[in-house]
Amino acid sequence: MQRLRPLLPLVAIGGLASLPFAFAADTTRFWQGVFIQIFILAIYALSYDLLMGYTGMISFGHALFFGAGGYTAAILLRQTEPPSMLIVLAAVIVVGATLGAAVGALSLRVSGVYFSMITLALAEIFFILFKADDPKLKPITGGEIGLQGIVVPAAIDATTYRLRFYFLTLACMVGLYYAARRFINSPTGRVFVAIRENEPRATALGYNTLHFKLLATAISSTIAALAGMLMVLYEKSASFEMLSVNLTIQALLMTIIGGIGTLIGPMLGAATIRLLDHGLKGEFMQALLPAWLRPDLVFGIVYVVLVLFFPAGLMGAIRKLRGKTSRSSVERLRQAMKPKAES
């Protein structure tokens, strides 16, 4: 079994690559769309886990970066002569990194719940601005209607080439996962973990923890912005809901369900939430459940059950089966919410 373990990621990637060919012909495009959304949400959850799971910072405004990447791509692609995707990609990376560094510079002077509340406040400011129907802002943001009718390069148009876009998002998810794992295993990534576990001790060792936390915020925000760009390319629209606190809560739930500080766990959490959402809102479940039992209520019950029986998340349960111990997601969450001065 030990010899076969390095092959498991290749088997998983191969399975996802062959998945579109396993569906019935009349449902292929639909399921391709479902898994495209899963891959994009997995990238988004991965970015959140880098911030919370490995650096110990809980942001309640992470959707700000997701929305910023989406709106940057949408605004550029709505030009009369849209720029090449390389320019759009570069712009999204620059905006994501710059915005992350700016938010970090404003909020990282405090820690714990105070940091979380500041990020929430900053995200709500942008949410209100992008939702407003102000005559000066609406031509840029679209107001409550958002930006519709975005022209996507024909080569990656998900409407025409759904399978091609499926493989594009799969490649982005796999590439960003391996890049994040490589970074976490680097000396800089080890400092992130040291800050999460004991920031005063990391400071005593000579590390400028503020600089490392700024770097973590910038990297996390950049990956989230890339996820937002992919979502806009898929849906061909950008809405102020991309900046809402509900989307941040989704990232938090995906991370807790999958397993905080595992990278692959939040990605599994994204798949679990998306498939569960699809199943609960499907016609079969709607006919099966009584009228008063709404899908959101059922999801809440399922979430409570998952937290109670899998306190370390899905990856924690898998590690337990393999004989490894893992700290519970609730314990990590409690530690991240605690101000460092009390550590």
Image (tube, rainbow, N blue to C red):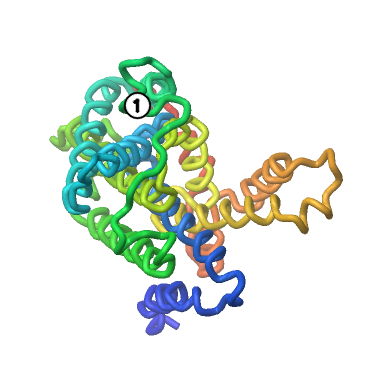
- At label 1, counting other C-alpha atoms closer than 10 Å, the crowd grade (few under 14, some 14-19, many 20 or more) is some
Above/below status of 97 relative to 310: above
Identify the image quadrant of the N terminus: bottom left
Q: Which residue is mark 1?
A: 340
Residue in view at x 43 percent, y 58 percent: 39
Q: Position of residue 340 (x, y in %)?
A: 35, 26
Of residues 326 and 265, the one nearer the viewer is: 265
User: Quick check: 210 above or below 54?
Assistant: above
Image side of residue 118 versus residue 310, left or right:
left
Q: In the picture provided, is 324 more to the left or to the right than 306?
A: left
| Quadrant containing the C terminus in the rendered view | top left
Residue located at (48% from left, 30% from top): 245
Instruction: Kindly identify the residue that appears in the image at 29 percent across and 64 percent down.
Output: 155
Residue farthest toward the left in the current orientation of the protein: 206
Q: Hey, which residue is sitting farthest right in the picture? A: 290
Depth check: 197 or 81 in front?
Answer: 81
Residue drawn at the location 76% of the way across and 41% of the way down: 294
Measured as percent of width and height from the top left, residue 93 is found at 21, 44
Kind of residue indicated by mark 1: Lys
Residue 187 seen? no
Residue situated in front as seen by the camera: 179 or 89: 89
Quarter where residue 210 is shown: top left
Residue 339: x, y in percent? Answer: 39, 24
